[in-house]
Image: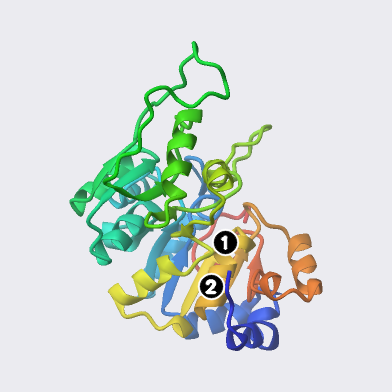
Amino acid sequence: MHITRQLFTRAVGGLIRMCDEISPNIAKEISNNVDNFLFDCDGVLWNANEVIPGSLETVKGLKALGKRVFYITNNSTKTRAEYAEKCVKLGFPASEEEIVCTSYISALYLHNMNFQGKIYVVGNPSMGEELDRFDLKHTGIGPDPPDDNQAGLQVVSGLTLDPEIKCVLVGFDKYISYPKMMKAASYARQKDCIFLATNEDTHLPMDVPFVIPGTGTIVASVKVPARREPLVMGKPETNMFRCLQKAHNLDPARCMMVGDSCHTDISMATVSGMQSLLVLTGVSTLSNVDTYKASGDPTQATYVPTYYANKLGQLGKLLGFSIPEKI
């Protein structure tokens, strides 16, 4: 991540680096000074399909105060319409215009640059739907299994590179395979080929006794053999916020990013000039924050939030919303 000296000075020298636990006075300041709330979803509002207690009441309460609410997710497995549908199903008020997801941002990025070639997608049907909305040609979605009769290290039989492919887009793909890695890396090695990734999340924050690898695992399987870094569309890069800022004329100084990951949510907020609230219901811990504060490293300095709360409902309770007693 490239951070300007100005951003770094702001990050380590101002209120944004204090990481105070929210209090009644801080909650009042937030209510007075923040017009727009950007929420990460998994690990903040819900885990899998279970709403985190207090999050629903807090979001509804903020909307009742006239605050604008947006849902910002690195998830590439849903379109904006599908994500809005999930929000509504779980009780959260949401419209398609309030959703920013990486499948949409990736398609929008290519559309805005007037991309004319074909895209090799290591991804899923929702990514394809968003590309289709902009009439972008693509291939690669779906199973592409290895040939069991072929030696493991041989070139895939009959493999030829399509000269129309001018972009590789990598997102979450449950059908990731050796042939897909080989094709994607081969295209990405070409100098005139754009190389995009929806995100590089290491794992999914789920309360289960095993690790759920994230999209970063799949991106690594392409970028390592390609020997090239992709342009990342999702957090911690600022593409998602810039898109939202342009569409809704947002002032970053009047915005707050609420997230559970210091590496993605909080870092994007810092670099974008927003305040941030870390909730401890997902990926990052206060121990992580202490490490970042003590590191003296410019990149890790962007991981330190303005404030933190045990749960999002803690903010709602301090703002006087009706929150379940167990918060």
Question: Badge 1 local density, few (<14 within 10 Å), some, or many (20+)?
Answer: many
| Residue 64 can be seen in this image | no
Q: Residue at x 40, y 40 (%)?
A: 123
Spot occupied by residue 174 in the image (x, y as percentages of width and height): 46, 32
Q: Earlier in the sequence, mark 1 or mark 2?
A: 1
Asked if 231 appears above or below 210 in the picture, the reply is below
User: Above or below — where is 180 with respect to 107?
Assistant: above
Q: Quadrant of the N terminus?
A: bottom right
Q: Which residue is mark 1?
A: 264
Label annotation for residue 211 = none
For residue 119, side relative to residue 72 (left or right) = left
Between 170 and 88, the residue placed more toward the observer is 170
Secondary structure beneath dot 1 equals helix
Whole-angstrom CA distance, mark 1 to mark 2, is: 9 Å
- Quadrant where the C terminus sits is bottom right
- Specify whether 206 is left or right of 160: right
Which residue occupies the foreground of this view, 303 or 276?
303
Residue that lies at the very extreme toward the left in this rendered image: 135
Residue count near mark 2 (Cα–Cα under 10 Å), binned few <14, some 14–19, many ≥20: many
Q: Identify residue type, mark 1.
A: Thr
Q: Which residue is mark 2?
A: 269
Based on the displayed image, in which of its 4 quarters is residue 67 positioned? Answer: bottom left
Residue 186 falls in which quadrant of the image?
Answer: top left
Q: Residue at x 35, y 59 (%)?
A: 105
323 to the left or right of 88: right
Q: Is residue 294 above or below residue 50?
A: below
Query: What residue type is disc 2 on?
Result: Ala
Q: Nearer the viewer, residue 181 or 54?
A: 181
Image position, residue 79 (x, y; %)? 31, 48
Dot 2: what SS?
Answer: helix
How far across and down, in percent of the image, does residue 290 sit? 79, 68
Give x and y (percent) for residue 176.
Answer: 48, 32
